[in-house]
Amino acid sequence: MYSLIVRNARLNDQIVDIAVSDEKIAAIAPAIPEQGQKEIDAAGRMVSPPFIESHIHLDATLTAGEPKWNESGTLFEGIQTWALRKQSVTHADVVNRATTLLKWQAAQGVLHVRTHVDVTDPKLTGLKALLEVKEAVKDWVNVQIVAFPQDGMLSYPQGAELVEEALKLGADVVGAIPHYELTRDYGVESVRLAFRLAEKYDKPIDIHCDETDDPNSRFLEVMVAEAIRTGMSREVTASHTAAFGSYDNAYAMKLMGFIRRADINFVANPLINITLQGRADTYPKRRGITRVKELWQNGLNVSLGYDDVMDPWYSLGTGAMIQPAHMAVHVSQMTGRSEVMACYDMVTSNAARTLGIAERYGVAVGKPADFVLVDAPDKWEAIRRLAVTTHVIRGGRVIAETRPPESRLLGERITFTK
Ligand code: 17E
Ligand code: FE2
């Protein structure tokens, strides 16, 4: 007996039924004759593995305007504004805001979230709160925590020790911020330190790297060298790498070859870097985003994050991953037929590789029964329509439902399809 059968779902251009038992996908076939304890008619909608948020700051989320707004819109006023808000951070404050955002995400089909948490706080308040949240939500969303030293590993008192303490307390991933260290030398040392900690505690690495338009910010090459030296590749993620978009082509071309050797992951955050970067430019004005299309063309793993929802760096957002995918199409000019679809993969399967969960991810027999129904027939249409996720299934249980919008003009149904 199947606990759940989803009928008439579109999977790779085929209409199938999907049966679930024991919290796993038990069968996928054009027509499953048995009855399920519960049945859902997908009505031709696409079934997709769940969305994945590969880069967000849940400790700062939902603080936009507190205690002031980021009027310049720069990364640096964002960091300064967060430093003010950080003074009033409490355990309950972080638990409440992070939990609220995780609910928004899960309701929209995001079932895996990698969050950075600022550990440049001697009390590690945000970290302790997020460790508690991670445990409390584990039945409906999988959270990974990056120990992120916002004010620097070497430029903030005891910064490196705080990162290490966070790992001892249970942080899953080692973070760093080399471009924001006081000197180039500190930046290089911070990357090396991150790799040493990763080896010591057997953890992956995710570094805020070169989040600046400064073409001389070249910490990505240091990450690549460390990844090659240690043999870590898939466990290493370079987040932001905005400066890669400002490097001259001769250097970028050489670097791309080294990156291919290292085979590390990249995370771009198109919603926020299109707004935070380029602020020192007049015209022409740079886009402030890493070379997403070229990395993808070179066969590297690129995923996308929101980075922020309603915080000092970005005051908009809902957490729906179709939005950064949609923005990446525009900012990275990935408008070709296969390019648009690739942007969908960047918030699903590529992100699973970034988080190191690819083995238990995907819509296939034997995988955990974690999947979503999206109100569109395919990836292209999902992005074009900024489609809503109508059903979220986690462990074979329907945990969220959203009614898709329906438009009528003078009584006529308008479907927005050609
Ligand atoms: N901190 C940082 O250094 N960069 C960012 N984009 C955010 C926080 C959101
Ligand atoms: Fe970030």
Image: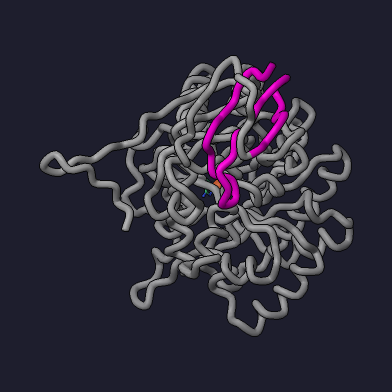
Specify whether residue 26 is painted magenta. yes
Q: Residue at x 69, y 16 (%)?
A: 1
- Dominant secondary structure, magenta: strand
* Figure check: 394 above or below 255: above
Question: Which residue: 65% across, 48% down?
Answer: 349
Whether 177 is drawn above or below 394: the answer is below
Residue 122 appears anywhere in the view: no
Colour mapping used in the image: one colour
Please tell me which residue lies in front, 95 or 398: 398
Numbered-mark total: 0
Query: Is 201 situated left or right of 279 in this image?
Result: right
Q: Residue furthest bottom?
A: 250
Is residue 20 shown left or right of residue 59?
right
Which part of the image, by quadrant, shows the C terminus? bottom left
User: Which residue: 60% across, 44% down?
Assistant: 54
Residue drawn at the location 67% of the way across and 19% of the way down: 2
Q: Is residue 65 above or below residue 300?
A: above
Residue 192 picture location, percent across and down: 80, 54
**Where, by quadrant of the figure, is residue 55 drawn?**
top right
Given the current orientation, which residue lies at the most extreme left position?
A: 410
Residue 204 location (% of width, % of height): 77, 44
The x, y position of residue 98, in whole percent, is 51, 27
Q: In terms of depth relative to the viewer, which is nearer, 78 or 256?
A: 256
Residue 351: give x, y in percent of width and height.
64, 48
Left or right of residue 413: residue 196: right
Viewed as shown, does residue 8 lie left or right of 167? left
Instruction: Report the magenta residues as a range.
Output: 1-29
Q: Toward which corner of the image does residue 52 lie, by quadrant?
A: top right
| 130 magenta-colored | no
Q: Is residue 222 visible?
A: yes
